[in-house]
Amino acid sequence: MSASILLIEDNDINMDVMILILNGLGLEVIPALNGPAGLAIARSQRPDLILCDIAMPHLDGFGVLNAVKSDPDTASIPVIAVTAMAADGDGARLLAAGFDSYLSKPVEIDDLKRELARYLPSWPGLRA
């Protein structure tokens, strides 16, 4: 059984690279090119995990997080920030805002696998 990952990312190149990586790990990727689309997908499909960019137009990652965590139907879905904003202090700010974790861009595959394994511990494809 494959885990489903909602990937909310407004940059086409970043989206394509992450889909390639996640598919290579045997994960089902549900893409969303902006926050509002991502929220609609989170509510309708209830993915196992959300990877969310922070700096996006229309609705940024903080807005997505707040909407996901305030909805009882989606509140239990882990949300990992994927951002270029993970400089000194920014990681602590992301965690304080309520993100379950964060990954710095460019994403290192080992870091991604570690975080995925942390939130999808029963999925055998992440054990290596």
Image (cartoon, grey):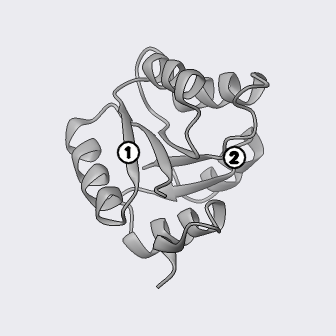
Q: Residue placed farthest to the bottom in the image? A: 128
| Quarter residue 89 falls in | bottom right
Instruction: For mark 2, give the secondary structure.
Output: helix
Q: What residue type is labelled 1?
A: Val
Residue neighbourhood size for the residue with mark 1, other residues' Cα within 10 Å, grouped as few (<14), some (14–19), many (≥20): many
Q: Residue at x 66, y 46 (%)?
A: 78
Residue neighbourhood size for the residue with mark 2, other residues' Cα within 10 Å, grouped as few (<14), some (14–19), many (≥20): few
Up-down: is 45 above or below 14? above
- Check whether the beta carbons of the residues at disc 2 and disc 1 lie within 8 A of each other: no
Q: Where is residue 23 in the image (x, y as percent from the top left)?
A: 31, 57
| Quarter residue 10 falls in | top left
Q: Where is residue 72 in the image (x, y as percent from the top left)?
A: 79, 25
Q: Residue at x 64, y 60 (%)?
A: 119
- Give the mark nearest the N terminus, 2 or 1: 1
Q: What residue type is labelled 2?
A: Arg
Q: Which mark, by number, is residue 93?
A: 2
Q: Which residue is drawn at 24% across and 56% down?
A: 20
Q: Where is residue 101 in the image (x, y as percent from the top left)?
A: 64, 55
Instruction: For mark 1, give the secondary structure.
Output: strand
Residues 123 and 94: in front is: 123
Q: Which mark, by number, is residue 50?
A: none
Query: Alpha carbon of mark 2 to alpha carbon of mark 1: how far?
Result: 27 Å
Residue holding disc 1: 29
Mark in the foreground, 2 or 1:
1
Up-down: is 38 above or below 13? above
Q: Position of residue 3 (x, y in %)?
A: 50, 53
Q: Residue at x 47, y 23 (%)?
A: 35
